[in-house]
Amino acid sequence: MLKNVPAEPDAMGKGTYSAVEGVRLLNFNRPGLAPARRVSRNTVARWLRGYSHGEDNTRHSEPLWRPDYQNEDDQIELSFRDLIELRFVKTFRDLGIGLPTIRDCYRRAVEEVRDDRPFSTQRFRTDGKTIFLEITEKDHDGRMIDLKRRQQVFRTMIEPSLRDLEFDASTVSRWYPLGMRQRSVVVDPSRSFGRPIVRQGVPTEILAEAVKIDGSIEAVARLYEVPKAEIRSALAFEEQLAA
């Protein structure tokens, strides 16, 4: 009988996500938040590896940052911090902000925060609004953007993502995809290699698959010694993840 599955830190405690796992988590959108566009594996690869463009692909855009793991050939592997950084890049793109502006925001944040992955830091959580408002003062055509509109965008689209994060010292340590008020599901790089788990430590995908096979939340709750409420949260999370 499985009870209180122990934490399983990977070698560096960074978490490990394949392209499929990473893209699924990036496209997760908690119920109640504004609808968001889905991001593809190819788009993630462009952000992490850079890409060529222009006539005859003679121009090259550099990666937004250097990932924790080498991403060579067709392989993409993400760490937890890479995943969190990508969540914010995706949010900016969902707002219609172009990559040149995102690069400006990233460079400014790196300078202010003094970390090469600034969006996943405590400092960005406190100072991110100022950085965002200053960088997005004008659109791509140089026209001024109303301050009230930009403040509303930050409040409704970006702040919710910051509130879902928990920090240890200066960097993000855990992500609660269902929100801080419902901490029954957590993504923690120091546990289960960063797979989404319930409080007891059992991966949500295992619980969801067990309910699918057994057909009974009560039976799975007894088998894994996990509260039924946590199993329901795991099912809701996995259902939204697959949407």
Image (cartoon, rainbow, N blue to C red):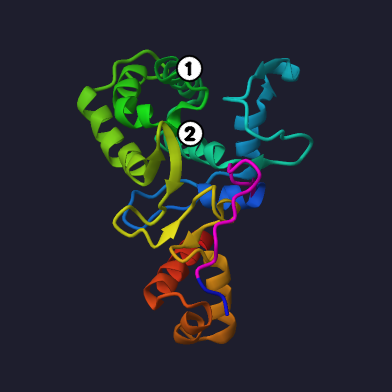
Answer with left or right where residue 131 lies relative to residue 60: left
Answer with left or right where residue 138 lies relative to residue 52: left
Identify the image quadrant of the N terminus: bottom right
Residue name at image x 44 percent, y 30 percent: 119
The reply to whether the magenta stretch includes residue 16 is yes
| In the depicted structure, whether residue 147 falls above or below residue 174 | above
* Residue lying farthest to the left in this orientation: 148
What crowding class fits label 2: few (fewer than 14 Cα within 10 Å), some (14-19), or many (20 or more)?
Answer: many
Which residue, given by chain and number where applicable, does mark 2 sit on?
89
Point out which mark residue 237 bears: none
Which amino acid type corresponds to the residue marked 2 in the rendered image?
A: Val
Q: Position of residue 219 (x, y in %)?
A: 49, 86
Q: Position of residue 97 (x, y in %)?
A: 43, 28
Point out which mark residue 107 bears: 1
| Magenta span of residues | 4-17
What crowding class fits label 1: few (fewer than 14 Cα within 10 Å), some (14-19), or many (20 or more)?
Answer: some
* Magenta: main secondary structure: loop
Q: Secondary structure at mark 2?
A: helix
Label total for image:
2
Q: Position of residue 170 (x, y in %)?
A: 41, 31
